[in-house]
Amino acid sequence: MSEYIEQDQTGATVGIVEKQFLTFAAPPDRLKLESGADIGPVTIAYETCGALNKDKNNVILVLHALSGDSHMAGYYNPEDSKPGWWDIMVGPGKGIDTNQYFVICANIIGSCAGSTGPSSINPETDKEYGTKFPLITIGDMVETQKALMDYLGIKSILSVIGGSVGGMQVLEWCARYPDMVRSAIPLATTTRHSALAIAFNEVARQAIMADPNWNDGHYYSGKKPDMGLAIARMIGHITYLSDESMRLKFGRKLQNRSALSFEFGAEFQVESYLQHQGNKFIERFDANSFLYITKAADYFDLARQYGSGSLVKAFSKCRSKFLVVSYTSDWLYPTYQSKEMVKAMKKNNLDVSFCEIDAQWGHDAFLLPNDRLDNLIKGFLRSASHET
Amino acid sequence: MKLDQLRYDLKIIASWIKPESRILGLGCGEGDLLYWLKKEKNVRERGIEIEESKVVKCIEKGLSVLQGDINEEIEDYPDNAFDYAICSQTLQQVYEPPGLIHSMMRVAKMGVVSFPNFGHIKVRMQLAFTGRAPVTKELPYSWHDTPNIRVLSLNDFEKFSSQVGFKILKRAAINTKNNHRQGKMVNFLPNLFATYGIFLIGKE
């Protein structure tokens, strides 16, 4: 997902939030991973907004995408220039209303924003894990979130909500802990990557691994593979946009010049935009984390994992009420993939609503201000809290 | 929403539905009927609607509605998943009505079908005296832009039932006024004087 972080036009905000940490699986315990490997201790960074009610039944778990973090809304301190990544959605009176709900967002395992990942120190070697970090899955991410729920004493979640790789975690939650999840909103997501999606991820990973600074993933004491990571991000950004959005946003417009200069600089605006996105990304993201999380997304296959290949069977244990949302111009996870999951849910007689929102901004549309999405989520959550 | 705010034809449909039943609304629009049934009769509702803006209105109301084509979407439901499948004011826009009726009878125990009556006297008079394709309040489009590609009369539907193989359990022939808020039953020569027909149908 991109960085579209926008302030809410109305000025409504959850205010100051604080990043908190939970550490578990400390010796003698270990966290068993889906691959068979284990790891410990594991730290998970998380943030909360709103208040937990007496019955602990107003919990909403927000799940972030590839490059997100626990900072979904609000500010760490009054001087921050930007709020959290989904500030337009999470806050008082917003789509996810913090006056009513207790909203939690945790940084995924394998990431680099406070949770244990390849850039964390391996206690056995006192060095960064690097590529000694075990491969993780979407299921492993959900396991760490479950550990956080247990720690917070939460047994029932009103709604799990997330877009893109966050949406995969939503689906995983519903399949893995069907009795805990009362409703779910998978946005702009898929039950498994298409060959196209895997292909883009692989090119992005190869860009990182081809950077001479990558050094098999052990670069933390020297120069970082910034060029590789920036290129990986540029590839990602192409898939997050759409032909239409790029045409409207850039067309063939030139950057800071009126004529072609016959050189290999960033002449077109789209080139300059991608380079800017790449350069911004390397300041905040770890290249190894990018490798691990994209791999987890590629591995994700709900039908294989929970239905021996059948998506209908994969949803057979689910009990949640669903709201599935796709976007017309999303070519990374096109609408047909959302419709496939809706079809499988219907065959299981699950309570599912589905809407394909007409938006020109491609996959990233779910991060942009959109009254339709706000109203959909608001109405759905209201009925979920009454009915479930 | 109060019952008297509901459109007259929808009021009649609503009165036929048993409380606590499972309902599938085909082409449910902004969900007025489903919402009323959910609130007043505690039904378990599902709706299918093709227009995004209407789907959003439904979901905002807290209804379970999905965006899509009724002919395709109805296929995914298990047999007898519903007590009633309701197709209100939509049959005349369906490309293959027998297929849709079959699907309704597969996924639900009973069906409700309503449509504007093409046998109404105004329709007949227009064609007879102007010699042009009729345009009425109930069927307000011109021949070249109408979504109503399968206009039919009440008698047509009666005959259709024996051809396609379902039985008519209840029928209501109605006339509406005041923007469809009010109306009355038509008992005398319904195929000539009713503007709308509503049928409750069951399996043979």
Image: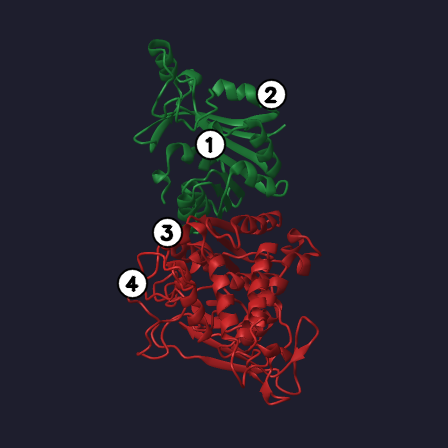
Residue A352's x, y, as percent? 53, 51
The vertical placement of A380 against A151, above or below, is above
Report the residue marked by disc 1: B90
Task: Have a look at marks 1 and 2 and say if they share a chain.
Answer: yes
Q: Residue A29 at x, y = what percent? A: 65, 84
How is colour applied across the structure in the image? by chain
| Rendered colour, chain A | red
How busy is the neighbourhood of tag 3: few (under 14 within 10 Å), some, or many (20 plus)?
A: few
- For marks 4 and 3, the one nearer the N-term is 4
User: Which residue lies under the disc numbered 3?
Assistant: A248
Q: Chain of mark 4?
A: A
Front one among A277 and A115: A277
Residue A9 disc label: 4
Find chain B in the image and tell me its colour.
green
Q: Nearer the viewer, mark 4 or mark 2?
A: 4
Q: Nearer the viewer, mark 4 or mark 1?
A: 4
As drawn, A307 above or below A293: above
